[in-house]
Amino acid sequence: MKNVKKWIIAVILVIVAIVGMSIKVYLTAMEPVKAAEKQAIKLAGNKVKFSEVNDFHIYNGLETVNVIEGKNKQGQKIIVWVPEKTKKVFVKKANSGLTKEQAIQKLADEKNPEKIISVRLGMEKNIPLWEIYYRSKDNLINYYYVDFETGEWLKQIENL
């Protein structure tokens, strides 16, 4: 009975150590993202005042672009793109372009996606865009890019 208790305690200690190390690794990995978010919000603050920030992500296309989604002081939904290199801030009202659902519909009208994996905002050559990552019928990976403002197809990468 004593040996069983020792084993149980040992297993619990190992599990606690693994969980603790996993949390530490995760927090360390997130530090650069949090720093990029803080800097992007600070830079965007010169053009727009946020009442809230709902989402932040880093888009890695032809260039790295920080994308912030939130609301301004007037309560309007806004999207801000901040390219890493130029630090030039692009601000658009969310209703001035396609919604996520409209971008997906644009893809569905032109292609026949089997499964949409992700849809996110990005920017390439100073053009705000939607990047749609999806799988086709043959389980091939595809990317489809739609202009945020006009809804025009920009480019696609197919059959990876």
Image (tube, rainbow, N blue to C red):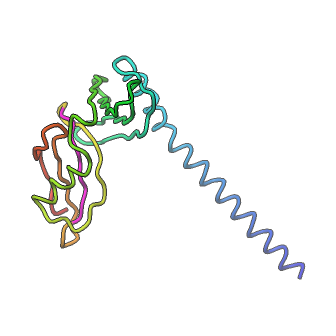
Residue 44: x and y, percent?
37, 23
Between 118 and 19, the one lying in front of the other is: 118
- Measuring from the top left, give residue 67's x and y in whole percent: 34, 36
Residue range in magenta is 127-135
- On screen, residue 137 versus residue 72, left or right, reads left
- Tell me if residue 84 comes above or below residue 148 in the rendering: above
Q: Examine the rendered structure and indicate whether residue 146 appears above or below residue 4.
A: above
The N terminus: image quadrant: bottom right
Q: Residue at x 27, y 23 (%)?
A: 86
The residue at the far right in this view is: 2
Specify whether residue 55 is painted magenta.
Answer: no
Q: Position of residue 16 (x, y in %)?
A: 71, 60
Task: Report which quarter residue 77 is drawn in.
Answer: top left
Q: Is residue 16 left or right of residue 135?
A: right
Majority SS type along the magenta span: strand
Image quarter (top left, top right, bottom left or bottom right) of the C terminus: bottom left
Q: Is residue 13 left or right of residue 32?
A: right
Residue 8 on image: x %, y %:
79, 73
Residue depicted at 50% across the width and 42% down the height: 30
Q: Residue 89 versus residue 73: which sits nearer the camera?
A: 73
